[in-house]
Amino acid sequence: MPNDLPSPTTARIELWSLREDVLVEDGPGHDELVAVTRWAEIRVDGADETVRESLRRMTLGPVSLGNVLAVGHSGNGHAGNTDSINGLDNIDDRPAWPNLLRVLDLLSGSVVRSLGLSDGDAPLLSAVPITPHASFHPADVDPSRPLRLSRFAAIRASGGELMVESPLSQYHVVLHRHLASRVVIALSDATTIDAVADVLAVAPEVVADIMGYLVGTGIVLVGDRVGHPPVARFAEDDDPTLTRWSYHDLLFHSRSRMGRYGGQTGAVFPHADTHPSPELVKPMRSGRRFQLYRPRIVDLIKSDPPLTAVLENTRTSADLTDRQLTAEQLGELLFRAARIRSVSSESVGTEVSYDVSDRPYLSIYGLYELELYVSVHNCADLPRGTYHYDPEFHALTLVNDSELELDELLDSARVAARSPVQPPILITMTARVARFSWMYGGIGYSLTLAHVGALQQTLCMVANAMGLAACAPAVDPGDVLDSALQLGWPGEVGVGEFLVG
């Protein structure tokens, strides 16, 4: 294990590199380069020898720019004297530095900033940009001021190392060495540089430099002591915008949008090389099967109210009665809202092909990862029980006839809808995770929730057009869902509910 207890005289080194997904190529002009990044292709003008050599080295890993800018450098890989963080000011006086700094600012969203030690081992930590316009400057932290991790920060394992990240930051920080991890862990509550140095038996100068990087990313906060007796306060604690966000909601939002997510996103087929395309529809379940009624579309066109009338009069209602529905009504509802109309093969402009379907509600790229389960309480010609809906053959298969679990589902729906009675029909929406994760990177689950909304809206409009009451409860039944529907969690997970009466 690298020596994690450097002495006060151990030099700290500011290191620079490019993200692993960056490719630097020659441009059309003799002094031009093109950097191909995950954000865009960036044209670099004025690429002199120092810029070219710096970027070349940065593609190989963290380097000290002081070495590249060393007096007498001739592009042959000669390394000059190592510059410590506190000694980098002399770089500013070197003629090539302003142009190199301009290029690094241009590529800021792809430049990784690392803190190293002169012991020759791995860097202490690296700040990796996750936004195209990330801007990083190590902070000069006053040793007397309190420091603390942001309440939105989280530490997780990644590639055999620890990573600390926050949806508020334009960077995630990779903790390469135990010392950096121990410093971060010490920041769970308000503390100071000297206090952390004392606890870890490390020189305050080393802790100060680590803190400077963490504060520079925004993952660690600098506060003030206020009141009598003085108490550490941080701006984040009183920010009216941030106090309205929970940690989980803000993290989910940031990771499901391109703006603050450093990984693959969009239709990138992350598992296409190792896994075949998941089935278009879930394999048929064993159990008692009921074929559902299929209305004639031509008859519906003649009898349905106009679309505008449906839109203007569509309402959700929790005031459901226990009046019995019919299997024909249920069949018409599912036929009009969720059946498979056609099947085809797609490729989305890639060499990867997969089956898609066309159904009445919206699903991006036609993946349709949602499954429907129907819990029947009071429906003519259908026994009480929980059924799986087959959208291809428009049929229900009984998957669970447990009265106890059925009542748990229905009672949960009744309470969520604030209804005095159990709903005649509860429709539960689940998602087959493999169906969307096979194609999407980063945004898969957020798209699934959008599909849930689209299906709920379609069901609601159809139900209202049929003269039925509909309600989409905001609370789910919890863990009983997995056993009642016989789901293989987390391969298939509950994502939404819908009541009909």
Image: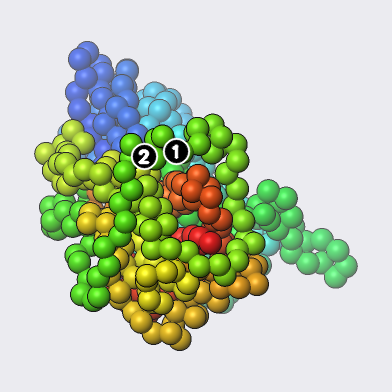
Q: Which residue is mark 2?
A: 299
Position of residue 125 measured from the top left corner of the image (x, y, whole percent): 40, 57
Residue 355 appears anywhere in the view: yes
Residue at 19% across, 23% down:
26
The answer to which of 9 and 174 lies nearer the viewer is 174
Quadrant where the N terminus sits is: bottom left
Tag 2 and tag 1, C-beta contact below 8 Å: yes
Which corner quadrant of the image does residue 259 belong to?
A: top left
The answer to which of 18 and 152 lies nearer the viewer is 152
Position of residue 73 measured from the top left corner of the image (x, y, whole percent): 26, 31
The answer to which of 269 and 17 lies nearer the viewer is 269
Residue at 22% across, 13% down:
29
Q: Which residue is mark 1?
A: 303
**Left or right: 335, with 209 as reference point:** left
Q: How many marks?
A: 2
Amino acid at dot 1: Ser
Position of residue 310 measured from the top left corner of the image (x, y, whole percent): 54, 38
Residue at 65% across, 67% down:
418
